């Protein structure tokens, strides 16, 4: 059965992924294309409650295995409550982060077993993967210079965030057809044009008309 298009944005803190996701959603709405915009973790009442726990800087002693299970719990609720219903209505779903984040932030950067987490991810998401993922890549120091980052994940060491970036780039090399790497240091409008160009291509392939 034909379904809607699923697009995710990924990247380290300060890369500009949320700005690009916002711009894409505005462009789709301007074309009167039904779109659902979500964030992971979060996006549902349950997910937002879990997000609060995950990002609270007071919970410094959270174990890595607890962390990954909380991310998966939030994602599972988001997938079944919001993503699958929207895709079944042939809507376009745009998400600020999805399963790739867990493979990078928890499996790669925290040295948790990648194969096991991949299995857990498939269980939590019914095996759903984005049709198109934008990885907005940027040097860690340059990204962090763009703002104040003070939640529990953002407060991790620079070495941790360097590993996150390395993990993303490794993942992108393994999934070249799905993951499009964008230069986060480019001008915002230029990046937006790149995003739209890729989205137009996949929309045409999926039978959407603009």
Image (tube, grey):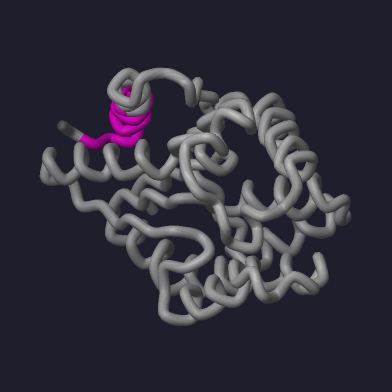
Between residue 65 and residue 125, name the one nearer to us: 65
Q: Is residue 146 left or right of residue 144?
A: left
In the rendered image, the vertical position of residue 73 relative to residue 197, given as above or below = below
Magenta segment = 196-208
Identify the residue shown where x is 80% and y is 73%.
Answer: 61
Tell whether 193 sits left or right of 143. left
Which quarter of the rendered picture does the C terminus lie within? Answer: top left
Q: In the displayed structure, does residue 143 sit left or right of residue 167?
A: left
**Closer to us: 53 or 155:** 155
Total residue callouts: 0
Where is residue 162 drawn, in percent x and y?
74, 35
- Residue 28: image quadrant is top left
Residue 51: x and y in percent read 54, 71
Task: Note whether residue 130 is visible.
Answer: yes
Q: Is residue 149 left or right of residue 26?
A: right
The vertical placement of 54 against 161, above or below, is below
Q: Compared to 204, does 82 lie above or below?
A: below
């Amino acid at each position: 059965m034909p379904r809607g298009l699923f697009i995710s944005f990924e990247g380290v803190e300060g890369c500009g992924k949320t700005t690009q996701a916002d711009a894409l959603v505005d462009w789709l709405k301007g074309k009167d294309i039904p779109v659902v915009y979500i964030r992971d973790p979060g996006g549902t009442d349950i997910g937002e409650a879990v997000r609060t726990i995950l990002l609270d800087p007071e919970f410094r002693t959270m174990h890595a295995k607890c962390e990954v299970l909380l991310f998966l719990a939030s994602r599972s609720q988001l997938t079944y409550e919001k993503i699958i219903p929207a895709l079944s209505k042939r809507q376009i779903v745009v998400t600020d982060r999805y399963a790739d984040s867990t493979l990078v932030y928890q499996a790669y950067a925290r040295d948790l077993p990648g194969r096991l987490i991949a299995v857990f991810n498939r269980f939590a998401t019914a095996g759903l993967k984005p049709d198109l993922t934008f990885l907005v890549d940027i040097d860690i120091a340059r990204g962090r210079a763009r703002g104040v980052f003070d939640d529990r994940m953002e407060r991790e060491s620079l070495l941790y965030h360097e590993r996150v970036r390395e993990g993303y780039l490794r993942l992108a090399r393994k999934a070249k057809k799905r993951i499009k790497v964008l230069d986060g240091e480019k001008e915002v409008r230029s990046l937006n044009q790149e995003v739209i160009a890729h989205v137009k291509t996949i929309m045409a392939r999926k039978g959407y008309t603009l």
